[in-house]
Image (spheres, helix red, strand yellow):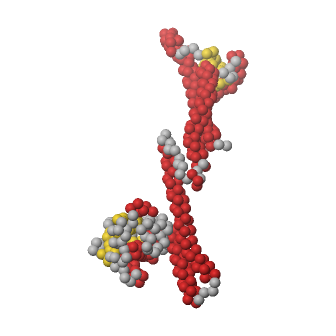
Amino acid sequence: MSSIRKITILLIISISLILFFLGSSVYFYLSNYSYADFYKRLEARVSVAEKHRFESNQKDAQILKNIREEHLELLSDEKEYILYCPNAISMKQLADTHSIPLNFLKLVYNQQFANFQKGEIFYHGKKREAQNGFYFVIVSAKNYYNTHHLIMLKKVLFAGGFISILIIIYLTYIFSKRFFEPINKIITKVNSISTDNIHLRLDDNRNTVEINRLTTTFNNLLNRIEIAIETNKNFISNASHEFGTPLTAIIGEADVALLKDRTPDEYKETLQKILKQSERLNKISQSLLSLAQIGYKENKLDFTIVRADELILQANEIMNQLIPKNNIKIDFELLPENPKKLKIMGNKELLILAITNILTNACKYSSNKVVVVSLASTNNEIVMIFKDQGIGIPQAELPFIFDPFYRASNTAAYDGYGIGLPLTQNIIKIHKGELIISSMLNKGVTIQVKLPIAKL
């Protein structure tokens, strides 16, 4: 069963139950009211009849007669009885003679007054004591309101309920169709999107805020998926190229060496070339593994409180071992007085690796010119600034420098694999930070690393 039918049926059943409950309540209330009100009318007539018969003189009797004619309208089949009964045994004879229910007379006899209904006839009676017996003062009539108006009300309620249900069926169907139509369009459009046409997007629905939010959210998801797919394609293309080059060189050197017998020096030279390409292949593999493991281990990393200045100093010590001729200058003039503004919640080894990658690139692409490292902080974040005087990055190529294996067009003379910056960016992202790069060609690169201050 479709969702439209389910919602239509659910709404019809729910609203029908509500209408049935309201109609039944109205009918029940008015029915009870009609009984109580009619018995009060009969009671008033019994009281007037009693006073007219037993408690009034000729003048009062005329007044009561006028009151009755002017204010008490004649009820349907109204009958008045003033019956003398010498004893309880005579009640049956009275009942048979005047066609009055015997049970009613017994109720009046025992309770002094009583209400009674037999079929469409309603009775109210009162017992009045007398010498050597008693009187029954009784008024009976048909309840016209109950027999006619309530029947009409019942018909109106049934007709109104039936018509209301028909209207509800129509409105709920239209509502469900209008509500689910854009969703069905979204489902159809989504089913038509694949990796071959990932550029397609859902149309905005400005008539419905919720549907518009859904399409916007899904379009944003498609944007991220498209970027991921393009990045993956670029990654695979570059990775295959980077792996292919050293493998081709290794295979080529081995084939040439095996074509004929070589001297020991020639074999040694060939092995050195193979070793060099193998080392290059190993570095690429290790870089790829590091890049992948950062993503997989993101939720399993151990974070502790570390100081930003200590991270820079330890990274500098590593650089002194890796590149002894480096010209790194550390500037702590903007160091905050409050040591709490230097503390970061993070993984020490990964942060040192990120800083080392930045310094390695700065030294390499500036040919060991001066690289200035500055440290400052605001109320919310720590800012590390790395500024070199190297070859810089072409402005048009800045958007691509975080793609794995991407290398700027002016870096052909320098060894590298295009892994360092993507790895560094991933580390900074894991620490909820931001990596900002600005550059001018042949004037150097400035990198800002912003990390949130630890909440102690």
- How many labels sit on residues? 0
Q: In this view, does 206 lie to the left or right of 78?
A: left
Residue 437, placed above or below residue 65? below
Relative placement, left or right, of 423 versus 383 is right
Instruction: Name the residue located 61 percent from the left edge and 19 percent from the top edge.
Output: 144
- In the rendered image, is residue 164 in sight? yes
Residue 293 in view in this figure: no
Residue 29 found in image quarter: top right
Q: Where is residue 211 in the image (x, y as percent from the top left)?
A: 52, 45
Question: Where, by quadrant of the figure, is residue 121 drawn?
Answer: top right
> Residue 307: x and y, percent?
37, 75
Residue 216 to residue 171: above or below: below
Residue 22 versus residue 381 in the image, above or below: above
Instruction: Kindly identify the residue that appears in the image at 45 percent across and 65 percent down.
Output: 402
Q: Where is residue 284 in the image (x, y as percent from the top left)?
A: 52, 74
Q: Which residue is drawn at 53% across and 63% down?
A: 234
Q: Is residue 407 above or below residue 264?
A: above
330 sits to left or right of 113:
left
Q: In which quarter of the image is residue 399?
A: bottom left
Seen from the viewer's position, the closer of residues 91 and 31 is 31
Q: List x then y, in percent, for residue 325.
A: 37, 82
- Farthest residue, direction front: 260
| Residue nearest the viewer, comparing 96 with 53 | 96
- Position of the C terminus, as image quadrant, is bottom left
Camera-side residue of 454 and 19: 454
Query: Looking at the image, which is closer to me, 224 or 215?
Result: 224
Q: Residue at x 67, y 43 (%)?
A: 1
